[in-house]
Image (tube, rainbow, N blue to C red):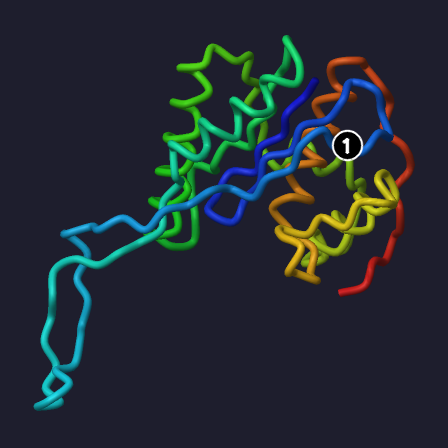
Amino acid sequence: MIIGIDNGLDGGIVALSSIGGLEPIAAHVMPTISVWHPNVSKTVKDKITGTARKTKGKFIREVDVRKLVAILDSIEGKRESMTVYFEQCPMHADQALTMRSMAMSAGKILAVLEAKAFTVVRVMSHDWHPTILGKFPQGTSKATAAATAAAIWPAVRWLPTTQHSTPHNGLIDAALIAEFGRRALFEIPAPAPVTKNPPA
């Protein structure tokens, strides 16, 4: 079994069989929790006077480690051996807060995986994109990923819950990362791209 993890607060965790084309064994959105951070400044307005004041601290989202462990435990119970393909966060980002959030998520996830003694292969988007998505126009990676996932698993809708109607990008990417790992483990050649010009 191969598990793909799309790092990030809106990422996903998808487990695939080593046999290609089968529907996912498990698919979960990344669990998150609201955590108080005292060093983050926030400007608030007094409801009575209307004056603005700064308060130190606010609630921000982070990966929920306890729920992540529960998810991995539920997947682990389905198979004895597994390899986890984890999309490592990049060493740079456009904004410092984005970099901090990605690094915090990666650190929490990797700590859990290491504590559980999983075999972990770290990959970057530039590793799996060419193999799984092929060449695609700039700015269309999400649409290409959705088209590719639909071609591999036509019956799977990738919805985060039954109440949603829009596919979850984090689940799609996690599944494709797992598919990248499956092909790498079994040295399966990549197929031709699904489409050269996916919809924007």
Residue 20 position by quadrant: top right
Q: Which residue is mark 1?
A: 131
Residue 139 percent across, percent down from the top left: 68, 58
In the rendered image, the vertical position of residue 108 relative to residue 194, given as above or below: above
At x 68%, y 52%, the residue is 159
Side of 81 relative to 46 (left or right) = right
Q: Position of residue 187 (x, y in %)?
A: 81, 14
Count of numbered marks: 1
Q: Say above or below: 144 vs 199.
A: above
In this rendering, position of residue 8 left or right of residue 195: left
Residue placed most toward the observer, 35 or 172:
35
Q: Nearer the viewer, residue 132 or 50?
A: 50
Q: Is residue 101 above or below residue 56?
A: above
Q: Could you tell me which quadrant the C terminus lies in?
A: bottom right
Say few, some or many: other residues with alpha carbon within 10 Å of mark 1 (under 14 / 14 to 19 / 20 or more): some
Q: Secondary structure at mark 1?
A: helix
| Residue 120 percent location from the top left of the image | 54, 17
In-front residue for pair 69/192? 69
Is 84 placed left or right of 106 in the picture? right
Q: Quadrant of the N terminus?
A: top right
Q: Is residue 109 left or right of residue 150?
A: left
Q: Residue at x 17, y 75 (%)?
A: 44
Q: Amino acid at mark 1?
A: Thr
At 47% from the left and 10% from the top, the residue drawn is 117
